[in-house]
Amino acid sequence: MLQIPEHNIPIVEIKTDFDVQIFIKREDLIHPKISGNKFWKLFFNVNQYLENKPENPLLITFGGAFSNHIASVAAFGKQFNIPTIGIIRGNELENNWQDNPTLSEASKNGMQFFFVPREDYQNKEKLTQKFSEKYPNSLIIPEGGSNEMAVEGVQYMLGNDTKDFDYLCTAVGTGGTIAGISRFAEEHQKVIGIKVVKDDSLGKMIQEWSRRNNFELIDADEKRYGKITDENIRFINWFYNEYHIPLDPIYTGKIMQKIFDLAEKSFFPKGSKILAFHTGGLQGIKGANQFLKSKGRELIAE
Ligand SMILES: Cc1ncc(COP(=O)(O)O)c(C=O)c1O
């Protein structure tokens, strides 16, 4: 069994001229490699699995070649001494994954890879069946790590220090994080999920996990899902200079820019106290910079 680690995560004020107060909770600092929401989403899944004392424990999961989740599962396995397998979307990196910063770090943390053509990767049910037959004692964690146990784990991102805020804001990918925040938020709090992926089924999924109606989903940038935009890079670099907090270009950079945008447009009532969760993802900056450099574009501060 894993012990819940001591955690004392700072909440930092982001001073602005807006008529609201903005704060950020540095969940990215919980662990140098398993940052933010990923730590809590994995914690109870793995703990429950280990409770049954599996013979030769093994964690298996899915993700893209730059995935924060893949990086986190590998680091989690290393930290708690459990072997890991990553089923990677697309087989184009099968022979040169060493150049990909996420995969090379995951491999250093002991992860073994299976590269799967994109068409086959879509069929997770079939893949899950195949891997559970091959490794019957393993724990197969869904892509992005969101499930009921992950939602339970997210409660540890909330505590006495988050109770006074009027708004709790987080990035939404697979929905487990916002569902946990929504489930465990105080009665008076409103939860804002900033969507960074196009998935129209997210609202329903989150509702099922959270069982509450205290959340609202807002698009980060509906026309440019998954894209790294120059405007966002400028924002991230400006934010880093101003507040000395790094942001990634897929999740946290997008949500902070959106929160600033919403504050400017008076979306939040005057005087509101807003808390954004820094859910990590900073490992992704290296891969993003590799791509940006190849295109001759501005790089991201790290
Ligand atoms: C850095 C970061 N922030 C936010 C999220 C979104 O979390 P969720 O998939 O639970 O919606 C992810 C994905 O796990 C992530 O890697």
Image (cartoon, rainbow, N blue to C red):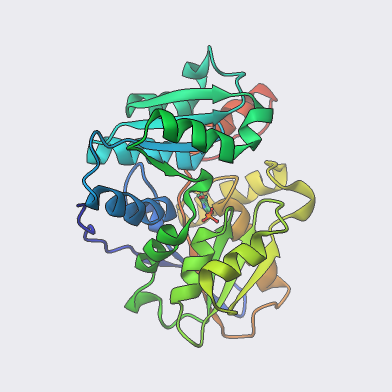
Foreground pick, 241 / 28: 28
Judge left or right: residue 58 versus residue 289. Answer: left
Residue 183 vertical placement versus 203 (above, below): below
The percent position of residue 169, horizontal first and vertical second, equals 55, 68
The percent position of residue 279, horizontal first and vertical second, equals 46, 55
The percent position of residue 147, horizontal first and vertical second, equals 48, 56
Judge left or right: residue 108 versus residue 230. Answer: left
Marks counted in the figure total 0
The percent position of residue 32, horizontal first and vertical second, equals 33, 44
Foreground pick, 79 / 231: 79
Q: Residue at x 39, y 65 (%)?
A: 152
Whether residue 260 is visible, yes or no, is no
Judge left or right: residue 284 versus residue 122. Answer: left
Q: Residue at x 70, y 54 (%)?
A: 199
Q: Residue furthest right?
A: 223
Residue 177 vertical placement versus 286 (above, below): below
Foreground pick, 275 / 183: 183
Residue 79 vertical placement versus 51 (above, below): above
Q: Residue furthest top?
A: 95
Foreground pick, 85 / 66: 85
Residue 64 vertical placement versus 240 (above, below): above
Whether residue 175 is visible, yes or no, is yes
Q: Residue at x 53, y 12 (%)?
A: 95
